[in-house]
Image (cartoon, rainbow, N blue to C red):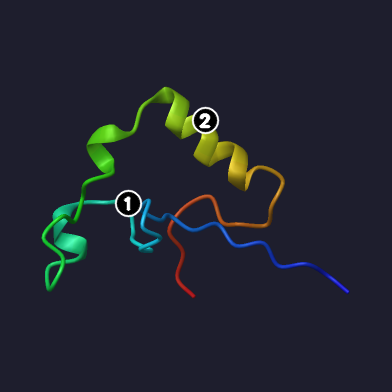
Amino acid sequence: MGLIHIELFATLDLIGQAPGGPEEDPVGFPFGGWQAPLMDEVAGAQVGAAYEGTDAPAGPTDL
């Protein structure tokens, strides 16, 4: 049987959220976009390593 691995962007209190800008979560979440200003080369390498060797698409796709 195969395995399914899930990569989830989550806050320390385990709130799942997209890592983009404030416009992504405009209702009920005043802190949208908090992660984007904190990304650097080290964080980018960690994200890249999480997806390396998977069948995950490299960018946005139409499903």
Task: Choose top left, top right, bottom left or bottom right for residue 6.
Answer: bottom right
- Determine whether, in the image, residue 8 is placed left or right of residue 10: right
Q: Amino acid at mark 2?
A: Ala
**Residue appearing at x 72%, y 45% in the figure:** 53
- Determine whether, in the image, residue 5 is placed left or right of residue 37: right
Residue 32 placement (x, y as % from top left): 18, 56
What residue would you read off at disc 2?
A: 45
Callout 1: helix, strand or loop? loop
**Residue appearing at x 12%, y 73% in the figure:** 27
Please tell me which residue lies in front, 32 or 24.
32
Please tell me which residue lies in front, 10 or 25.
10
Please tell me which residue lies in front, 30 or 46.
30
Callout 2: helix, strand or loop? helix
Q: Is residue 10 above or below residue 2?
A: above
Residue 20 placement (x, y as % from top left): 27, 51
Residue 51 placement (x, y as % from top left): 60, 47
| Disc ID at residue 6 | none
Question: Disc 1 versus disc 2: distance between alpha carbons?
Answer: 15 Å
Q: Amino acid at mark 1?
A: Pro
- Determine whether, in the image, residue 28 is placed left or right of residue 43: left
Task: Report the residue that reaches farthest toward the right.
Answer: 1
Residue 56 placement (x, y as % from top left): 60, 57
Q: Is residue 2 above or below residue 54?
A: below
Task: Choose top left, top right, bottom left or bottom right for residue 60.
Answer: bottom left
**Residue appearing at x 13%, y 72% in the figure:** 28
What residue would you read off at disc 1?
A: 19
**Residue appearing at x 51%, y 40% in the figure:** 47
